[in-house]
Image (spheres, coloured by chain):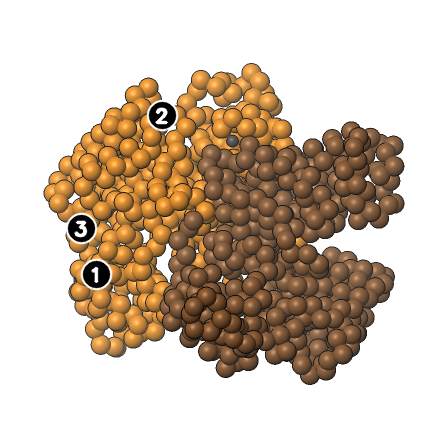
Chain colours: A orange, B brown
Amino acid sequence: MAVRKRSSRDIRSESRLDVLHALLSAGESNRNELARTTGLSLATVATVVSELLAEGLVEEAGLSVSGVGRPTTTLRIHGARGLIAGIDVAETYVSAHVFDAALAEVGTADLALDEHETSAEYVVDAIVRALDAAVASTGLDRSRLLGVGVALPGLVQRSTGAISVVVPKWSWRAEDLIDLLRERVGLPLVVENPLKAIATAELWLGTGRGAASMVTINLGTGVGAGIVLEGQILRGATNSAGEWGHSLLVHEGRGCRCGRRGCVEAYVGAPGIQQTLREIAPDHPLADPDLPQRDVIGALATALRSPTPDPAVVETIARTSRYLGAAVADVVAIINPELVMLTGWTAWALGDDLLPGTEAEIRAQSPNGAATDLTVGISTVRGNSAAIGMATLAFERFLGDVGLVTTRATLAL
Amino acid sequence: MAVRKRSSRDIRSESRLDVLHALLSAGESNRNELARTTGLSLATVATVVSELLAEGLVEEAGLSVSGVGRPTTTLRIHGARGLIAGIDVAETYVSAHVFDAALAEVGTADLALDEHETSAEYVVDAIVRALDAAVASTGLDRSRLLGVGVALPGLVQRSTGAISVVVPKWSWRAEDLIDLLRERVGLPLVVENPLKAIATAELWLGTGRGAASMVTINLGTGVGAGIVLEGQILRGATNSAGEWGHSLLVHEGRGCRCGRRGCVEAYVGAPGIQQTLREIAPDHPLADPDLPQRDVIGALATALRSPTPDPAVVETIARTSRYLGAAVADVVAIINPELVMLTGWTAWALGDDLLPGTEAEIRAQSPNGAATDLTVGISTVRGNSAAIGMATLAFERFLGDVGLVTTRATLAL
Ligand SMILES: [Zn+2]
Ligand SMILES: [Zn+2]
């Protein structure tokens, strides 16, 4: 494991985050147990806990007596401290999720977007309506919101100081959206690309916290990577790092919806997997491009669980595993992470089927030693991980605003 | 440009490094000028300069009077403070270079290795003999050496705490080499992979210093990348980050000497470029695999400068530019750096010919926005950049040992 380089100032922030993470995972805990799970000294845990108690983020849940010792105070995240919203905006829908301060979902609302209505006003209005509906569904007051995180499709960039959003299908100037959002939401706000939000969800609620380096591989209609180095999302010069889905898998290969050829996404995105099936069995009922993608992926998973699995489906999974393994091996060669986590709805449906072949191919295709200490797994985070990740980013911003952690490079508005 | 996150402790180290870098670039300077070039306050520069003067790393070179002001003290790196050695070890040679503390080369010695003699004793003995010969060529005493950096071919890994070296053609256990080296050199020692050494050379002596993120692309017989994020080399979980040369360019493409197929190196390494020529013109005189690689690359460069350039060579360069651009675009998609610097002897010979096509292909193949703020250039660092980089790493270690910079994660023995 790489040595983490941290300053004393970072160390205080990280200790607070470590304790929060440990409490989030455990549900309830106490100072001794927190010291054991975080590896921090009992004195540090005690200091951090008093800071978190003072801020109302942690509460005492009672006393517990174990064995012959003195009773210990049970601690938990004070969920009622406030609400955090995470909103996943795609070209065809807005999905708003409201969480309590313990990151438990307490309300949600979905809303379809008309793909042909692409004005900034229309999109922002839909975001605000979804947010309000999600808050309303909790029965709690909107004033309890501590912050809002919005995942925007396409690239959320920071170039020469300004935040801009590039969504190929949306024609309006990105600045209009950002200004309108800021004005209409009227709350501490962060915006991010879904890939970075998903990686943050893995860092907060998945297995990423302990790793010095992690790559999340998101598999859905589109695919992409989130890169986490020493607990921080790699953003890159213009916040575009992780666009692995449009890196090259097959030189001059399949056409990709981005306009180029041979991209990873054209092979391991859901439509790419269906195209592989079509190449193997052109007349296969699941090869029909008009079928909804999630239905196709779900049906492939079902077919594999049959006592006599469809050989065309088996071969599709075998080829997809090889494509995916070769594509992930490229990230492994370049980044040399400790941990690769597959996530997204394709990974949740087909992950167990894809994992053995993918992992074997990663190891076969990685240069000497790059995969020596590598762990590959399927994320245990479920639900709308872009929305969950945005909520964690909004929560991080809140922690920064109240002075509990040093500012991370979130794209805060 | 991404915001650099730094602690106050880092800031002091970085200020010292900034002043040292500025003095190295300028040759001679003064406090006012150093404040301007580094962007540091005059007070900070004054503090740093007194620290460096106290350590004997900077010396006063005299007084200069400019305009009507008071005379200012001219400063320069105190080259005579000591010697630093950088040694490039390949499978067929050892090249030792000795630098003064201002990183000016003052002596060198090369030594051929018998590829069939692969015992650790043989290799270490050759390293020590080359070092001693290089020191002898300076006419200065070996006791003046402040440190030694050795670039070892293959992967220098840090896995579960221990440093190991994996060189496919060398059969001995890596630990033996490390132990022997430590014993025989008897001086502060760092070992690293050449790719990371080359990236460090670019950081110290090239254009990398000002960039928040940089990728060096080394083009020679082998190819590989060095990734620099916020002034630090990305090492990865087992110090294997940057093995881009063996990431995939063409799925199931050309065989690579690493045993896999379709690697970047098989297309843009010198033998790969020659193979492209062979595919275009099988009987071309430069397509003969028995020709020395550097001669082939040099002859291609000469042919391009003819009034009537050989069309097969022109086409070879065009294809190589597309291969290289597509391969670099993958790193750009994943890392989203500010700066890509091509380096290595192929880049020095053919860089100006490759650059336009490569840069166009990088931009064409990069996902939306990933190349927006990207600068692509040819390194101005010449000579044995692995040896130069190892000397800068040994110098960094020395700065750490005397307490001038916080320890960086160098692989120090
Ligand atoms: Zn694409
Ligand atoms: Zn290879």
Which of disc 1 and disc 3 is earlier in sequence? 1
Task: From this view, report whether residue A251 is shown above or below residue A231.
Answer: above
Chain letter behind tag 1: A
Q: Which residue is mark 2?
A: A171
Q: Quadrant of the C terminus of chain B?
A: bottom right
Give the residue drawn at x 21%, y 61%. A58
Asked which secondary structure carries label 3, the reply is loop
Which of disc 1 and disc 2 is earlier in sequence? 1
Q: Is mark 1 within 8 Å of ligand 1?
A: no
Where residue A160 sits in the image (x, y, percent)?
40, 44
Which of disc 2 and disc 3 is earlier in sequence? 3
Residue B351 in sight from this viewpoint: yes
Instruction: Please determine if labels 2 and 1 lie on a single subunit.
Output: yes
Give the residue drawn at x 34%, y 73%. A41
The answer to whether residue B365 is left or right of residue A27 is: right
Task: Kindly check if marks 3 and 1 are in contact, taking CB atoms under 8 A apart as contact.
Answer: no
Where residue A401 sits in the image (x, y, percent)?
24, 55
Q: Which of label 3 and label 1 is nearer to you?
A: 3
Task: From this view, report whether residue B228 is shown above or below residue A72.
Answer: above
Asked which secondary structure carries label 2, the reply is loop
